[in-house]
């Protein structure tokens, strides 16, 4: 799930956008009317998308962009007559008034970017060092010898213990080795 924050100076407009998004399958975490409220919500979240007006009650979208955590994307609804030379980095603009399908398709594109970023970050986190891989392998070998398990059975056993104990696989392997050697 991607965190979505909607912010417009008139709370009623924000609620209308939220209803459109919910009807189209998105989950909206908060509706705000000020930049300060957005920043407060964003501080509680790891990443997400902010959909807002170019001008909020207390700040412009550029000020907000500078203060937002870097893993947040921003979709700004702007009046094309007042729009200058283009969107700054990390900001997607949607000309007002916009059609529902324009909002939804733009948000789907942004949603995909956030999901890919999350998957990439998760894959980086799960890469193990050579030492960790050896620890897991040694624990499997101990289980295979002492309990007459195949490598696959030993691995499944360690995964189950890991889930049951709320530890990662490396910690489980270390526990098995310390119990078997102690």
Image (cartoon, rainbow, N blue to C red):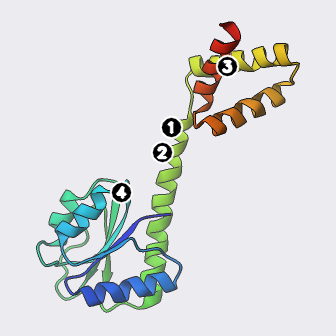
Q: CA distance from mark 3 to mark 4?
A: 36 Å
Q: CA distance from mark 4 to mark 1?
A: 19 Å
Q: CA distance from mark 2 to mark 3?
A: 29 Å
Of the numbered discs 4 and 2, the one sitting upstream in the chain is 4
Q: Secondary structure at mark 2?
A: helix
Q: Are marks 3 and 4 in contact (CB under 8 Å)?
A: no
The location of residue 149, given as percent across then percent down, is 86, 23
The location of residue 35, given as percent across then percent down, is 18, 69
Closer-to-camera residue (119/58): 58
Q: Is residue 10 above or below residue 131?
A: below
Q: CA distance from mark 4 to mark 2?
A: 15 Å
Q: Which mark is residue 176?
A: 3
Q: CA distance from mark 3 to mark 1?
A: 23 Å
Q: Which mark is residue 125?
A: 1
Residue at 50% across, 59% down: 115
Q: Is residue 165 above or below residue 24?
A: above
Of the numbered discs 2 and 3, the one sitting upstream in the chain is 2
Q: Which mark is residue 121?
A: 2
Task: Report whether 74 appears left or right of 157.
Answer: left
Residue with the most extreme top position: 182
Name the front one of labels 4 and 1. Answer: 4
Q: Are marks 1 and 2 in contact (CB under 8 Å)?
A: yes
The residue labelled by disc 4 is 45
Name the front one of labels 4 and 2. Answer: 4
Closer-to-camera residue (153/127): 153
Of the numbered discs 3 and 4, the one sitting upstream in the chain is 4
Total labels: the figure holds: 4
Is residue 88 in view? no
């Amino acid at each position: 799930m991607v965190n979505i924050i909607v912010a417009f100076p008139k709370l009623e407009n924000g609620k209308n956008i939220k209803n459109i998004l919910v009807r189209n399958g998105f989950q909206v975490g908060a509706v705000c009317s000020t930049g300060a409220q957005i920043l407060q919500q964003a501080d509680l979240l790891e990443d997400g998308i902010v959909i807002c007006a170019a001008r909020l009650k207390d700040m412009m979208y550029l000020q907000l962009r500078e203060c937002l955590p870097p893993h947040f994307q921003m979709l700004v609804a702007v009046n094309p007559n007042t729009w200058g030379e283009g969107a700054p980095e990390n900001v997607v603009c949607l000309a007002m008034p916009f059609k529902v399908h324009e909002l939804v398709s733009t948000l789907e594109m942004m949603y995909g970017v956030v999901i890919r970023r999350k998957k990439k970050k998760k894959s980086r986190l799960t890469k193990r060092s050579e030492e960790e891989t050896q620890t897991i392998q040694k624990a499997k070998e101990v289980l295979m010898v002492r309990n007459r398990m195949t490598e696959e059975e030993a691995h499944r056993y360690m995964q189950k213990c890991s889930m049951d104990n709320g530890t990662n696989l490396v910690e489980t392997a270390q526990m098995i080795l310390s119990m078997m050697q102690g």
